[in-house]
Amino acid sequence: MTAHRSIITVAANSVWVRWLPNALPAAGYITLKNSSDKRYTVTKLRSPDYKSITIYQTVTDAESSKMVKVDKVEIRAKGEFAFVPGRYHLMMEKPTRLITPGDNARVVFFLDDGTVLKVRMPVRTSPELY
């Protein structure tokens, strides 16, 4: 019997952090792909580069849009979960060091099965700067 292990990968060209000056909160974007037959849940986030990372969803109705904090997100079996502008993002607050465009922000995703996924997220002023 082999141990079941998650198969979560990062979609190419989906990873970046929108940099803002003066240590303002940054927004992180990434698409997580699941090639397994099991669904996974991102339950916690940490970073040595930010004191706080939380997940927010943009909710829009006929008159306005607002950001709503989300405790966890699910990556469906044989599917993906996208943190993209206008839908979901990682709110990255209180940098622990000077972060500027061209840097990489380190983010650790904790999954419900105990898997830890470490990602380096390029810091940019615009998504087009790949």
Image (tube, rainbow, N blue to C red):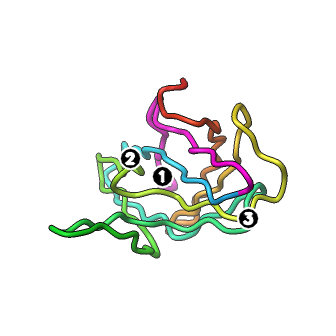
Judged by depth in the image, the label closer to the viewer, 3 or 1, is 3
Q: Amino acid at mark 3?
A: Lys
Of 90 and 21, nearer the camera is 21
Q: Position of residue 82 (x, y in %)?
A: 37, 49
**Quarter of the picture holding the C terminus:** top right
Q: Secondary structure at mark 3?
A: strand
- For the residues labelled 3 and 1, the Cα–Cα distance comes to 31 Å
Mark found first going from the N terminus, 3 or 1: 1
Range shown magenta? 1-23
Q: Position of residue 28 (x, y in %)?
A: 54, 50
Q: Secondary structure at mark 2?
A: strand
Please name the residue that numbered disc 2 is placed on: 34
Residue 94, picture quadrant: bottom right
Please name the residue that numbered disc 1 is placed on: 6
Residue 94, disc:
3
Quick check: marks 3 and 1 in contact, CB under 8 Å?
no
Q: Secondary structure at mark 1?
A: loop
Judged by depth in the image, the label closer to the viewer, 2 or 3, is 3
Q: Amino acid at mark 1?
A: Ser
Q: Position of residue 11 (x, y in %)?
A: 44, 35
Q: Residues within 10 Å of mark 3 (few under 14, many from 20)?
A: some
Mark found first going from the N terminus, 2 or 1: 1
Mark found first going from the N terminus, 2 or 3: 2
Quick check: marks 2 and 1 in contact, CB under 8 Å?
yes
For image coordinates 69% across by 35% down, the residue present is 101
Characterize the magenta stretch by its predominant secondary structure.
Answer: loop
Q: Position of residue 86 (x, y in %)?
A: 34, 53
Quick check: marks 2 and 3 in contact, CB under 8 Å?
no
